[in-house]
Image: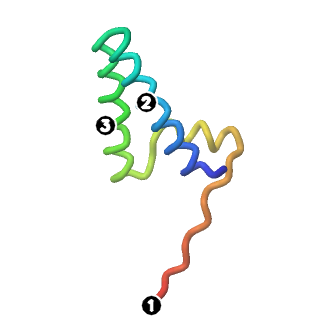
Amino acid sequence: MTVERAVRFLAGVILLVSLALAHWVSLDWLWLTAIVGLNLFQSAFTNWCPAMSIFRWLGLPSAEPVPHRS
């Protein structure tokens, strides 16, 4: 698994868990959904999020760049 896939996986899991908690426990869990969404939004522009640093520290490799076709 690469850093990029691990970040997408973690974001998806956190979003689904927070939605389930909002449904069955308290609507306040939607704040976690909003935080994850905002983090994904900012990482689209900066190409950085805290999870990337953690996964790199754990030793996950980065994805190989895709060669550009003309």
Q: Which mark is residue 38?
A: 3
Q: Earlier in the sequence, mark 2 or mark 1?
A: 2
Residue at the far bottom: name it: 70
**Closer to the camera, 19 or 65?**
19
**Closer to the camera, 24 or 9?**
24
Q: What residue appears at the point 59 percent right and 36 percent down from the top-left corner?
A: 54
Q: Are marks 3 and 2 in contact (CB under 8 Å)?
A: no
In this picture, residue 48 sits left or right of residue 9: left
Q: Earlier in the sequence, mark 1 or mark 3?
A: 3
Q: Secondary structure at mark 2?
A: helix
Q: What residue appears at the point 46 percent right and 29 percent down from the top-left corner?
A: 14
Residue at the far front: name it: 24
The local crowd at label 3, few if under 14, some if 14 to 19, many if 20 or more residues have their Cα within 10 Å, is few
Residue 33 drawn above or below residue 58: above
Q: What residue appears at the point 63 percent right and 52 percent down from the top-left corner?
A: 2
In this picture, residue 59 sits left or right of residue 5: right
Q: Secondary structure at mark 3?
A: helix
Can you give x and y, in whole percent of width and height, for residue 48 in the image? 45, 46
Q: What residue appears at the point 45 percent right and 24 percent down from the top-left corner?
A: 17
Q: Secondary structure at mark 1?
A: loop
Can you give x and y, in whole percent of width and height, for residue 68 in the image? 49, 81
Residue 60 drawn above or below residue 22: below
Q: How far apart are the alpha carbons under marks 3 and 2?
A: 15 Å
